[in-house]
Structure formats: structure tokens, C-alpha cells
Amino acid sequence: MFGFFKKALDKTKEAIKSVVGSEKKEKIDKELLEEALIEADIDYELVEKILDKLPKEVTKEKLKKELLKIFEVPQNRIEINDKPYTFLIIGVNGAGKTTTIAKLAYKYKNEGYSVILGAGDTFRAAAIEQLSLWANKLNIPIIKTRQGHDPAAVAFDTISSAKAKGIDIAIIDTAGRLHNKVNLQNELKKIVNVAKKAYEKAPHKIILIIDATQGQSAINQAKVFNEIIGVDGIIVTKLDGTAKGGALFSIVNELKLPIYFVGIGEKPEDLVEFDKEEFVDGILEGLYSE
Ligand SMILES: Nc1nc2c(ncn2[C@@H]2O[C@H](COP(=O)(O)OP(=O)(O)OP(=O)(O)O)[C@@H](O)[C@H]2O)c(=O)[nH]1
Ligand SMILES: [Mg+2]
């Protein structure tokens, strides 16, 4: 896995270098640094907050300290410490929920865990079909109903089935319609409540999927999800091929939630554990070229 994460930042580093140049440097002038950080898609206010504490000429060490501070949020890793360990995957349409579920299933299966999927996006027939295709490909069981049926029942059946069959991990998909906040809230709350009827500790992790390419609007939507249901952590998708790596700073700064993984492509193996040191080092490499 090592190095994959840094590679996901290639475009962001290019964007940074287009501002600061690609020669090696000891210090960067604050104004130039401001421009580069904004170019990497860190939002303006946060850039100001970072630079506020720094001198006119900024060394790599000083900047690193400030950048790492942003990621000082509690509990950064997922530990599979219960059975069935249950994930509820939420997020807006197209954020990458279903694809990320396939990636998580692939990862945990490779680590020797048994996995079951729950097709809880019953809103679209295509969504159930999409997750079924992944289940087939990855050769793992899936619980599904017909389109329009109750997603909470799917969650219940998935967790019950995991319990009955001694499956280690259950991952449940959801629909991401946000046009009606009250409906979404009712639906998600019901899913959580009914999941608890199948197993009182479920869901162990409610994970919000955020599309890195969506910028501030994705952060605002994430806040809504966090308000209505309470989120444990984040997976940021589509970090491949985007120069918006800096968005991760803004996401964590505004939501104060851990980033568990980052999606760097459409294939099941395109999921890497988020490592704040590696991430910050990648950004610094773009800036100081060393
Ligand atoms: N490049 C890239 N594409 C991704 C990534 N994650 C997901 N996608 C693509 O984004 C699109 C939407 O992904 P889905 O997994 O269907 O998103 P969703 O949140 O389940 O969408 P809905 O079911 O419509 O709510 C698909 O074309 C995915 O292949 C990623 O990390 N990188
Ligand atoms: Mg989906």
C-alpha cells in the first residue's frame, strides 16, 4: 500500500508547483504560500487560519506542524473488535457509496474476514442491481429486497443473517436523496433503530462518503448528514485525478471527524487507509520540492 496515497496527490502537487515552482526551497514567502494552498483547494478561511500563526518566510517544519494540527481529531482507525461488526454507509447521490462498499468488502475479505452486504438503497432498482453485481464479483453474500421496499428491513435482515451465519462484517448501503431533509432523517433514523433490534451494538460505524471533487457543497451536505444522524467518520472518494487534495483539510477542519480511508479509483483495490503524516508530507513535497 505504501506510496499509493502519495500518488493520489500527484495532481494536487502539480497544482501547487504551478504556483511556487518546482525548485527545491528552504522557505516560502507567506503570500506565495497562501496562493499555493488555495490552488490546492484548501478554503480561504482555513488558509488564513493556518498562515496566521506563521512568520513572513515559512519553513517546511513550521508549516508541517500547523498542517498536522488540523488532523488532530480523536480516533483515526477502524478496529474490527466485535461480530458482526456493522457499517452503515451514507452520503449524497453519486458520492461513491456503493463503490466504496465494494472496496471495503474487498479489503476485509482479503484480510480474512467474512463479509455480507445489505442492499439498503431500495430507492432505485439499479442500485440494488449495482451492489448485487459487486457481491457476485467479490463472491460474497448479499441481502436484498425489491425496489421500494423498506430499507430498515434490509438492514435488519442483513445483520440477522450475519449473526445466524457467524459472518464477521456487515456493510449496509443506503439511498442518498437529500431533497427532503425530514424524509432522509426519518429514513436513516429508522434504519439505525431497526438495526439495533437485530443487534444492539449495530451499527458500529456510520460512515459518511464525501466526493472530493465537490468542494464546499460536499462539506455543507456532510454537515446536514452529521446533524440528522451523527457520523463516526468519513471516507473521501475520487481523490484520483483531482487537484483538490487540499479539500481534505477543509473537510476535517469543518466536521472534526476522522477520515478512515480515501478512494483513489473505481476498482475494488482503489481504497487506501488515510495517513495524515503521509498526506501532509505529500502536500509539503509539492511546496518545497524535497
Ligand atoms: N475516479 C473515481 N471514481 C469513483 C470513486 N468512487 C466512486 N467512483 C465513481 O463514482 C460514480 C458513483 O459511484 P457510486 O458508488 O455509484 O455512488 P453512490 O453514492 O452509490 O451513488 P447513488 O447510489 O446514486 O447514491 C461511479 O461511476 C463510481 O465508479 C473513486 O474513488 N474514484
Ligand atoms: Mg449507490
Image (cartoon, rainbow, N blue to C red):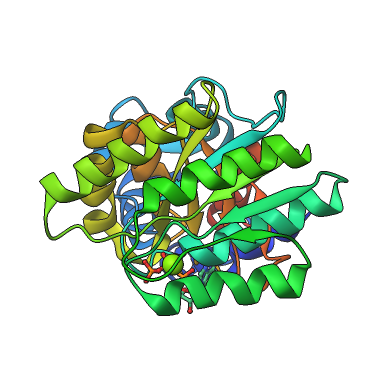
Given residues 95 and 34, the one toward you in this image is 95
Residue 5, image quadrant: bottom right
Given residues 91 and 215, the one toward you in this image is 91
Residue at 44%, 56% in the rendered image:
120
Q: Quadrant of the N terminus?
A: bottom right
Given residues 132 and 279, the one toward you in this image is 132
Residue at 42%, 47% in the rendered image:
153
Is 263 situated above or below 74? below
230 to the left or right of 143 = left
Q: Is residue 140 visible?
A: yes
Q: x, y (%) of residue 139?
A: 78, 67
229 to the left or right of 186 = right
262 to the left or right of 112 = left
Residue at 47%, 25% in the rendered image:
69
Q: x, y (%) of residue 199?
A: 55, 26
Q: How many marks?
A: 0
Q: x, y (%) of residue 148?
A: 31, 67
Q: x, y (%) of residue 226?
A: 29, 36
Q: Is residue 290 visible?
A: no
Residue at 88%, 46% in the rendered image:
112
Given residues 213 and 269, the one toward you in this image is 269
Is 89 situated above or below 189? below
